[in-house]
Image (cartoon, grey):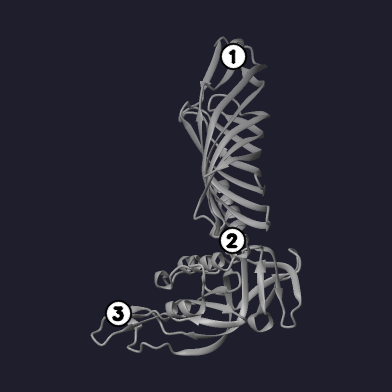
Amino acid sequence: MKNLLLHICLCYSLIIGAQENFEQGSYADNNGNIIEGFINNRDWSINPSVIEFKTELNSNIQKISISNLQGFSIGKSIIYEKHKVKIDRSSNSLEKLSQNREPNLSEENLLLLVLAKNSATLYKYRDTNNTYFFYKENDIIHSLIYKKFLTLDNKIGENNFYQQQLNTGFKCSNGKLLSSSQVKYTESSLIKFFKSFGECTNNQKNTFVVKKEKDNLFNIKLIAGFFINSFEVDSNTRRTFDYGSDSGFLPGIELEAVFPKNKWSVFFDARYHNFTGEGNIDVFVPLNSETVSVPTAATYTALDFGLGGRYYVTISDKSSIFFGLNIAIDFISDTEIIFNEGIMGNGISTDFLDNGSSVALGIGLGVNINPINFEIRYHSPRNTLRAGTSETLYNILMFSASYKLFNF
């Protein structure tokens, strides 16, 4: 139990430490200088006003506020730009709606997330209450106006002025532009409109659109590697004996479901491993008052099923490190311990290991270099014998590489 708690605490501390997710990026200061480094990607659900920056992964964290930057980017898909915009902070929550149909606009400097860009740029800003959209054309920022309000008969009305703004601000001569009346005040609908504007103006190939990661991604992986294991028996009727260590080839297969937004994944895998060890135990024979050496051997064969989770920390576009925790269940087959006690007149004595299952906790550490995961995984000691006979300590350390065959 102490070992189990130790493993849990260790893995917990690793995961907590992994919450800092610095990725390659850059920011522009107020003089227009581009500073390269690493930015803590927090997958912001609310637009940030401060970023955490490192010049190197092992350097100190610098906190850079919106007043000291013009914008920043992480990789190729996350771009924030600072702009002075007019924004209506009125809440769209039902209990806070007013009867004022018109927006109450005030000017603020905000970091806006770029959603799409061609000859015009679409932005998003989100605070704790609302989501707002803006667009820039000819270096002028426009607030796309949408507001809920209460009508005189206490019904919910909507000011959809943004549709009129799209209709007057975006013109297309070939008729390919999506009708503004069909555009909803949502991210996906507005991006669709901007893509149609790109087609209309022959800028479709130059249209930048934020790549949305899939809600989940299933990977099928083939596992190959090797293991190092050890086996020890503590018998009620015989001496404690350490069968030493063994090693061998580790084959397996894995199904992993990845959730990109928060870098977590869950996995289920199956791995085959075995153990063979032999030696001699010194046994005292009362009949002739002497100690004799008794041969003993142990074999253990199991199919290991693991169910657990991983946390990935991105290092670059193609690599990351990960920490894992899993429950491991060994399904044991045809395995035994043999003591040759013929010297004492008892013949061969056999303790069969439980042909059911045994459970352990596994912790893992690895690196992903797409499409391969390299992992070191350790399983806590487990007892593999039937209750009421002897006790065993079976340990295993696995070194594996898993290759992504395909995903869906």
Q: Nearer the viewer, residue 246 or 114?
A: 114
Q: Assess disc 3: are there few (<14), some (14-19) or many (≥20) residues with their C-alpha within 10 Å of its C-alpha.
A: some
Does the image show residue 236?
yes
Dot 2 or dot 1, earlier in sequence: 2
Outermost residue on the front side: it is: 173
Under circle 3, the secondary element is: strand
Which callout, 3 or 1, points to the residue nearer the camera? Answer: 3
Q: Report the residue marked by disc 2.
A: 16
335 or 243, nearer to the observer: 335
Seen in the picture, residue 74 relative to 31 is either above or below; the reply is above
Q: Residue 115, located in which quarter of the rendered image?
A: bottom right
Camera-nearest residue between 228 and 44? 44
Q: Are marks 3 and 1 in contact (CB under 8 Å)?
A: no
Q: Nearer the viewer, residue 299 or 56?
A: 56
| SS at badge 1 | loop
Q: Image point 54% across, 57% down: which residue?
A: 213
Decide which of tag 3 and tag 1 comes sooner along the chain.
Answer: 3
Residue 77 in the image: state x and y as whole percent: 62, 63
Q: Amino acid type of disc 3?
A: Ile
Callout 2 environment at 10 Å: few (<14), some (14 to 19), or many (20+)?
A: few
As helix, strand or loop, the secondary structure at mark 2 comes to helix
Q: Residues within 10 Å of mark 1 (few under 14, many from 20)?
A: some
Residue at left offset 64%, top offset 17%: 294
* Label whose residue precedes the other's in the sequence (3 or 2): 2
Q: Which residue is mark 1?
A: 341
Question: Which residue is the site of mark 3?
Answer: 156
Question: Vertical placement of 282 versus 4: above or below?
Answer: above
* 115 w.r.t. 367: above or below: below
- Tell me the CA gap for discs 2 and 1: 53 Å
Q: Decide: marks 3, 2 in contact (CB < 8 A)?
A: no
